[in-house]
Image: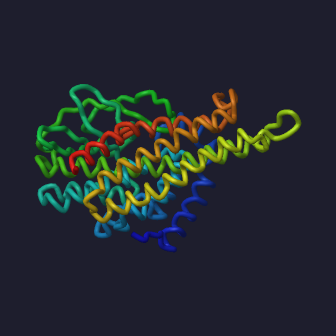
Amino acid sequence: MHFAFTDQQVEFRHAVRQVLANECSTDDLRSSFDAPSARGSRWETLTELGVVGLTVPERHGGLGLGLVDLVLLLEEAGRVALPEPLVETTALAAPLLAEVGDAESSASPLVSAWLEGIAAGRAAAAVGTMSAGPVAIAGADGADLLVLFTDGDDGRGEVHVVGSDQVTVTPVASLDPTRRLGSLRWTPTTDTCVIAGPAAGAVIRRTGDRAAVATAAELLGLADRMIVLAADYARERHQFGKPIGSFQAVKHLLAGAQVKLEFARPVVYAAAWSLDEGEPDATRAASVAKACASDAASEAARVSLQVHGALGYTWECDLHLFLKRAWALAAAWGSAADHRARVLDSLVARA
């Protein structure tokens, strides 16, 4: 397979990178910790650019594009540790709602309203699986729309779409203060269920695959940013009269992290393409992407922290903003070990 991003996709990435560089500095991230909402002027700007509604069908006011078009933008979001719920809203909720709206005519009016709200920037979403007790879901604190899954037997399940006024959300302290978690208390009803049974199970699985690839894309951006921070510090920090970046051991650490990142990038891009095209091995590709990206980001975090030394742990150092996001996302939607186990199971089943 020969694959390359189009000129338009690359130009869109550059435009988003420039906007985020101007509007999502590390000072902006620190300001977001205590902000009453995760969304502000950046969300409005991203909406105007078409990023938020990128996966919303055109008939509902979006661009009607796919994960391949979004993956580069998610990488840029990771590069700045974007606090807004772009993955949850654009990569997960919008495609799911579009799929459900096409499959279930009875849910179409409700789904259409939410899709139009996402495209217009009025609605931000959180997506997660409910259990017997309260569960913490990324983006739930401050979300307008919640897409919630309930598991069933034999691949069955239910997908519920609820407004924030229908659930009780309690903020939960997070390792990453830019990633807002909310603990939900909510009782499923037939009124909120938009799809059930085997069809719902298939939608839930596809959403899980998209989540793995979307978080993998963010992890690529995080890994790149941490390597750059470490390299910059290695040029500035002097020991024995010379920059520590001139020492062979430090060069090898940074080079090793960069190699892991460069190997993970095409894997993530290929997985996005596989999901968009509905390839038979798309689920396995998504797992490989999440495992490789989690490994790359974890290695970049380890190396950048080692290069910075004790300074890297301090609140004043920018590095901790990206370390915490990388650690959180490496475990989100399945760890590297979880996804390797999925790959192994799929290969054994195929043998």
**Which quadrant of the view contains residue 58?**
bottom left
**In the image as oriented, which residue stretches furthest toward the right?**
241
- Please tell me which residue lies in front, 345 or 180: 345
Residue beneath the point at 35% across and 36% down: 137
- Please tell me which residue lies in front, 95 or 253: 253
Residue beneath the point at 36% across and 39% down: 334
Coloring scheme used: rainbow
Residue beneath the point at 63% across and 43% down: 26
Does residue 345 lie above or below 51 as drawn? Answer: above
> Is 100 on the left or on the right of 3, as rendered?
left
> Is 15 on the left or on the right of 217, as rendered?
right
> Is 77 on the left or on the right of 28, as rendered?
left
| Quadrant in which the N terminus is drawn | bottom left
Q: Is residue 53 visible?
A: no
Residue 47 image offset from top left, x and y in percent: 45, 59
- Please tell me which residue lies in front, 220 or 258: 258
| Count of numbered labels shown in the rendering | 0
**In the image as oriented, which residue stretches furthest toward the front?**
351
Does residue 50 lie above or below 196 as drawn? Answer: below
**Which quadrant of the view contains residue 114?**
bottom left
Q: Is residue 8 visible?
A: yes
Residue beneath the point at 25% across and 41% down: 148
> Is 294 on the left or on the right of 125, as rendered?
right
